[in-house]
Amino acid sequence: MKYNKNQLQKYRQNALKIDTTLDLETLAKERFPTTVLALSNLHVIGSICYDENEDILLKAKVTGQITVPSSRSLAPVIREIDLNFDERYIEDDKRLVDFEETDPVFVLENDTLNVDEAILDNVIAELPLQILTPEEVESDQLPSGKDWHVISEQAFENEKKKADKIDLDSRMAKLDDFFKK
C-alpha cells in the first residue's frame, strides 16, 4: 500500500481507516533475506490522518506469523506477530530537530507514504536478538565443535573469577584484605 501525499489530502478532516490483509512475504525476503524465512499474510488495522502541524500520522496494529532462523542453530522458528505502532511523517527534514531522537519521525520520500515498508520495518524491529526453538529453550546443551564450544554468560563469569583467583600472587593476598577496610 502506497499513498501519495495528494491522495491523502482528502483525509484531512477524517482519517483514512485501514482494515486489510497484506501479503508482504516477497518484499520481506527481498529486503531481509537472512532474517525472514517465511511470513504469513498480515492483518492490519489502523488509520492515516493529518495532525494540526500538517504531519501525517500512521497508526497500525499488525498480527500474523513470521518464520525466522534460530540464533543458535539456524533452525526455523515460528513467532507470533502482535504489534502496535505509531509513526509520524513530515515533509521537511529541517523539522527533525523539533523532535526527540527516540520519536518515530520520518521524512516522506518522493511525497509517498509506503505503508508496506513501514509495517515490515516495524515487524523486523520487534524481533528479539536471541530467537531459540522450543527444544533449544529447554535444553542446556550449547553448540560445540572441534576445538571450540559455546558457554553461557554465567559460565564465562565463573571461569573468569577462577582465573582471577589463580593469578593472584599468594604474597600479595594480604594486601587484598587491606583495601577492604
Image: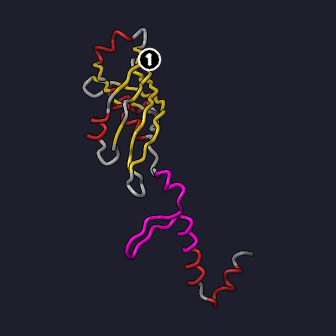
Quadrant housing residue 9: top left
Residue that numbered label 1 is attached to: 51
**At 41% from the left edge and 35% from the top edge, which residue is drawn?**
122
The segment highlighted magenta reads 133-160
Residue found farthest to the bottom? 171
**At 31% from the left edge and 38% from the top edge, which residue is drawn?**
28
Q: Quadrant of the N terminus?
A: top left
Quadrant housing residue 125: top left
Residue found farthest to the front? 135
Q: Say whether residue 158 is magenta.
A: yes
Q: Position of residue 171 (x, y in %)?
A: 64, 91
Relative placement, left or right, of 125 versus 116 is right
Q: Position of residue 30 (x, y in %)?
A: 26, 40
Q: Say whether residue 34 is magenta.
A: no
**At 54% from the left edge and 56% from the top edge, which residue is drawn?**
138
Residue found farthest to the right? 181
In the figure, 157 relative to 105: above or below?
below
Assign a secondary structure to mark 1. Answer: loop
**At 42% from the left edge and 22% from the top edge, which residue is drawn?**
57
- Coloring scheme of the render? secondary structure
Q: Quadrant of the C terminus?
A: bottom right
Q: Position of residue 54 (x, y in %)?
A: 39, 17
In the figure, 104 relative to 139: above or below?
above
Q: Residues within 10 Å of mark 1 (few under 14, many from 20)?
A: few
Number of on-image labels: 1
Kind of residue indicated by mark 1: Asp
Which of the pair 149/159 is nearer the observer? 149
Q: Position of residue 38 (x, y in %)?
A: 34, 40
In the figure, 175 relative to 100: above or below?
below
